Image (cartoon, rainbow, N blue to C red):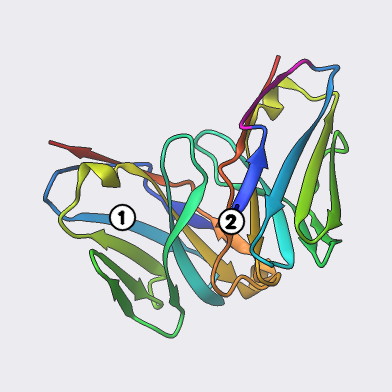
Amino acid sequence: GEDVEQSLFLSVREGDSSVINCTYTDSSSTYLYWYKQEPGAGLQLLTYIFSNMDMKQDQRLTVLLNKKDKHLSLRIADTQTGDSAIYFCAGSFTGGGNKLTFGTGTQLKVEL
Amino acid sequence: ETGVTQTPRHLVMGMTNKKSLKCEQHLGHNAMYWYKQSAKKPLELMFVYSLEERVENNSVPSRFSPECPNSSHLFLHLHTLQPEDSALYLCASSPTATPTYGYTFGSGTRLTVV
């Protein structure tokens, strides 16, 4: 089956760039997503990338996809304290019936 | 009201109680989902409904019983739960059961079983 893995914690200083990484095992990905969860809230879709793309940029967010290595990353430029949250990588895989499979989430802490 | 709304936000129940979680979406979506979120574990997909028909039940214990009376409403009926069922229960919806543009999530119900 499909498996999505992320590191649990990342700490950065305000103004620096943050890079959150994700790896997955199923090569039959169709779409890959990044979600943000703030305390006491549900998951908010930040961005997504089709599996036939290598990169997608949306304001401060840059998503990079390396299909060969099954690696997805989310770069947040000029990280702010409001970016502190849990970030989830998710994928839609043919082997998973095209439902979303989520990673464990990466807690991003932004320090002054 | 727009988006996906879940009630109640917090729920404390005893192991012998019966309660229900409610989810409502005003997005015109045809698919709805229940997820369980426990600390340091991936989100666990519990149930999937497409056009009010249950299309997936991921080996969820029978003490959790979903109901989808129409495409805008989804319930999760709870009875004789265990302490390990304490978690954040998230409802989500999508235009179809194929999540091309991802899911829209509610804020969740924080459930504590005592």
Q: Quadrant of residue A93?
A: bottom right
- As drawn, B111 above or below B60: above
Residue A54 percent across, percent down from the top left: 34, 80
Q: Is residue B57 left or right of residue B23?
A: right
Residue A54 at least partly seen: yes
Q: Is residue B108 left or right of residue B63?
A: left
Residue ID for mark 1: A20
Residue B58 at least partly seen: no
| Residue drawn at x 79%, y 41% as measured from the top left | B76
Mark-to-mark CA distance, 1 and 2 = 30 Å
Residue B26 percent across, percent down from the top left: 66, 59
Residue A16 percent across, percent down from the top left: 12, 51
Where does the C terminus of chain B fall, quadrant-wise? top right
Secondary element at image label 2? loop
- As drawn, A39 above or below A24: above
* Most frequent secondary structure within the magenta stretch: strand
State which region is magenta: B9-14
Residue B40 percent across, percent down from the top left: 49, 36
Secondary element at image label 1? strand
Q: Chain of mark 2?
A: B
- As drawn, B98 above or below B58: below
Residue ID for mark 2: B2
| Residue drawn at x 71%, y 69% as measured from the top left | B97
| Residue drawn at x 66%, y 67% as measured from the top left | A96
Q: Chain of mark 1?
A: A
Q: Nearer the viewer, residue B32 or A27?
A: B32
| Residue drawn at x 62%, y 52% as measured from the top left | B4
